[in-house]
Image (tube, rainbow, N blue to C red):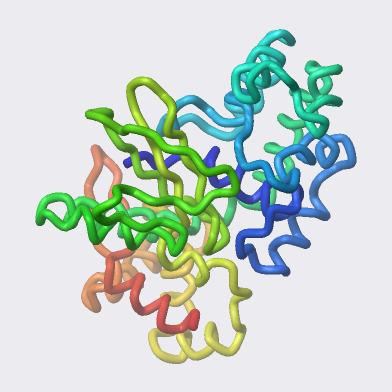
Amino acid sequence: MSISPNLTALAVIADALAGRRRGLPERWRRAVQESVGPRAREAVRPLGAPGYSVVPDSVVPQTPIEGFSVTSQAELLRAVPEEQLTADLEQVFGGGVPEHWRPAADRPKRWFAGYAAALEDVWDVTGPLWERASSLLDREVERVGTAVVRGGLDVLLSSLSERIQYGEDGLLIADLEPSRYDLGDRKMILVPMLAGRDAVIVKLDHPEVVWIAYPVPGAETLWRERDPRAADELAALIGPVRAALLHTLDRPATMSALASGAGMVPSAITYHCERLVAAGLVSRERRGREVWIVRTRRGEELLDLFRH
């Protein structure tokens, strides 16, 4: 598995900006559209051309590298030689550049800059949600690991998306441009994305690995607006300070960071964290001299209950 934000950014771009709708909620689609400038919009237009699903390698990293940020990908795009796009287009489309890619091929430097800007603009909106998705991604890593260890890979692959089926005929993926690949003994990388329910991105022609990017289960809970009434109900159940702390812990945090964020003295934060630990909603981890607070699975389930 690989937890790579770049494919999430690409899926959101294709759905919200390029017109290839794959189930992104309308509210989120509008938020993304409002954040992107005209030059970036122009650059992503070829990604949604009717009848085409294949894009040049310049658009997507060859392999989804974990820890490689969207910002790093944008910087890399701006440094790509102009002739690289032409070479990629010729390789993908057999020597003839389709009409919808012609403006990009004519001015590749401008296209790379526009696409890089689109990535950055989209991530300004999507990045905070990606941070909140950490617990969903952790659960998915656990789910996939359990399926592999217990010999349930066939069931797992069929559960990734309604557009993917695994059976006697192999791995079938619904696509606009049908083709057949022999996966051989290449490694397969699964990449969960924060994307619309029908979004699937694959790379099947790499000589060493194949990868499949698919919507992480439970993503729909993050697209929803937080219901103020639900927040009030959670606060009534465990107290407003502890409810706020539980929401804050999308990522593990130190006691000092929690105290600073809440505007409270450390002793007060320690008291509330102890109560959350006793309830099984958070756990403490010592890392060097610092004590980190981590939201537990039980804490996640409680939040999910009040998000619905």
Q: Is residue 1 left or right of residue 22?
A: left
Q: Return the residue found at the far right.
A: 38
Position of 40 relative to 11 (above/below): above
State the image quarter where residue 300 is shown. Answer: bottom left
Question: x%, y% of residue 20?
Answer: 69, 53
Asked whether 221 or 124 is in front, the reply is 221
Asked whether 36 or 270 is in front, the reply is 36
Q: Is residue 206 left or right of residue 150?
A: right
Position of 297 relative to 291 (above/below): below
Position of 205 relative to 255 (above/below): above
Question: x%, y% of residue 160?
Answer: 37, 58
Q: Residue at x 75, y 43 (%)?
A: 49
Question: x%, y% of residue 267?
Answer: 36, 64
Q: Residue at x 31, y 59 (%)?
A: 139
Position of 93 relative to 119 (above/below): above
Asked whether 111 or 136 is in front, the reply is 111
Q: Quadrant of the N terminus?
A: top left
Q: Is residue 271 left or right of residue 78?
A: left
Q: Residue at x 47, y 57 (%)?
A: 215
Number of callouts: 0
